[in-house]
Image (spheres, rainbow, N blue to C red):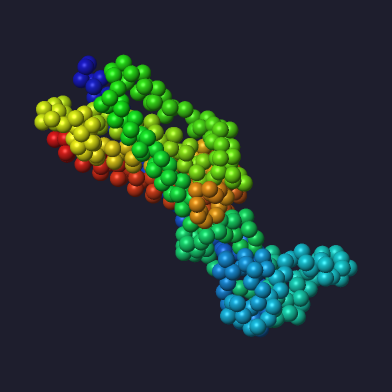
Amino acid sequence: MKKFIERLFESLFTISGFATSVAILLIIVFLFKEGSGLFNSPEVEKGYALCVNAKNGATRLNSAQIKRIFDYEITNWNELGGADEEIRPFRFDEIFSIYSDEELGGESYSLLTEKLGEVIASDPAIIAFLPEQYVPKNNRSVKVLPAEPIQVSDFFGGKEWLPTATPAAQFGVLPLILGTLWVSLFAILIALPLGLGVAIYLSELASEKTRKILKPTIELLAGIPSVVYGFFGLVVIVPLIQKVLHLPVGETALAGSLILAIMALPTIITVAEDSMRNTPRAMREASLALGATQWQTIYRIIIPYAASGISAAVVLGIGRAIGETMAVLMVTGNAAVMPHSLFESVRTIPATIAAELGEAPAGGAHYQSLFMLGCILFVITMAISISAELISKKKNKGMM
């Protein structure tokens, strides 16, 4: 009976482990499948087309050029390698200001298409943004620009994140990646010396009574919901930064870094302190017996011995910072711009996903781009986890 129960539990654990592994694998496959669909989406808004006069030499425009044309930032075709003519952007609804309802036959489909063809044919410098059903396909004076798919280089190298822009959405992810790394890096630079100092105090200087009080309190900080940290940052840290530094707004990368530093501290302190306490007693006693002071023993014996454990603490702290969503969403200002200093608003990848996923139409390019952001975040956190595992193995080998 005892062997049967043992085998039953062994089978249950095996099935549980297998089911968990399959579920994780399916989640990863789904994530990358949805994200990769972005590069099959056209640069121009789905269901629409760009038309030019047949005499126009333009053959292809990328999404950035299209946006700049319709934002009147590019105003002459010679800027795109064409003739020296002023570009005339034309949107579908402008046809109703050119022709009356009677001339359009009460917005008749065939007459609308015909009139649109006439407008495009009469102006060599025009570029029209039209619904696909109204494109004058039978008019030889009208040329439809090919709808190229979104390029990988535009996605990873683009500097604008405007997924709702028309006629061409901008999916430049570089500001989001840099914003994520920028905030996380400075959070670790703040948290590391503080966390290491507290870990040294708890491991080597604090009395047993003090340690029994402080360590559970610090570990309790890890259980506080991130939205609570966000409220604290919004009410305390953001106004303080704005007032002390005389900034227009306090929602900056610095505010995000401070909040993330506070959130990463429990992980860094706990892992680093455990690593220091695992230093063999004989090594401490040998150092003291040779005449070293307590501080000399700490920075010449204990810290070098626990270096791999401290490194693992830093890596885990970075992982916590990079993956944080709600607190960062509340205090960084959510401006998807290239970061230049800590005193500007930024936007991180997790905050972007949380803020926009509910508004993105399922299956659209915006929706797929958010899944692609999830893929990027997955790769970053996986790299951090692998680094932590390698550091941990190195630590274990060093202790053997």
Residue 100 position, x and y percent, is 87, 68
At x 69% / y 78%, what residue is drawn? 86
Residue 316 position, x and y percent, is 35, 39
> On screen, 350 above or below 151?
above
Task: Depth check: give the residue in front, 46 or 374.
Answer: 374
> On screen, 370 above or below 392?
below
In the image, is 153 to the left or to the right of 293? Answer: right
| Displayed quadrant of residue 197 | top left
Does the image show residue 357? no
| Displayed quadrant of residue 250 | top right
Task: Indicate the quadrant containing the N terminus: top left, top right, bottom left or bottom right.
Answer: top left
Task: Depth check: give the residue in front, 7 or 30.
Answer: 30
At x 39% / y 49%, what residue is drawn? 379
Residue 396 position, x and y percent, is 19, 37
Task: Depth check: give the residue in front, 261 or 267.
Answer: 261
Most extreme residue toward the right is: 102
Does the image show residue 89? yes
Task: Indicate the quadrant containing the C terminus: top left, top right, bottom left or bottom right.
Answer: top left
In the image, is 159 to the left or to the right of 5? Answer: right
Task: Depth check: give the residue in front, 289 or 67.
Answer: 289
| Displayed quadrant of residue 3 | top left
> How many numbered marks does the figure carry?
0
At x 52% / y 37%, what residue is drawn? 327
At x 62% / y 80%, what residue is drawn? 78
Residue 322 position, x and y percent, is 43, 43
In the image, is 247 to the left or to the right of 392? Answer: right
> On screen, 138 above or below 225?
below
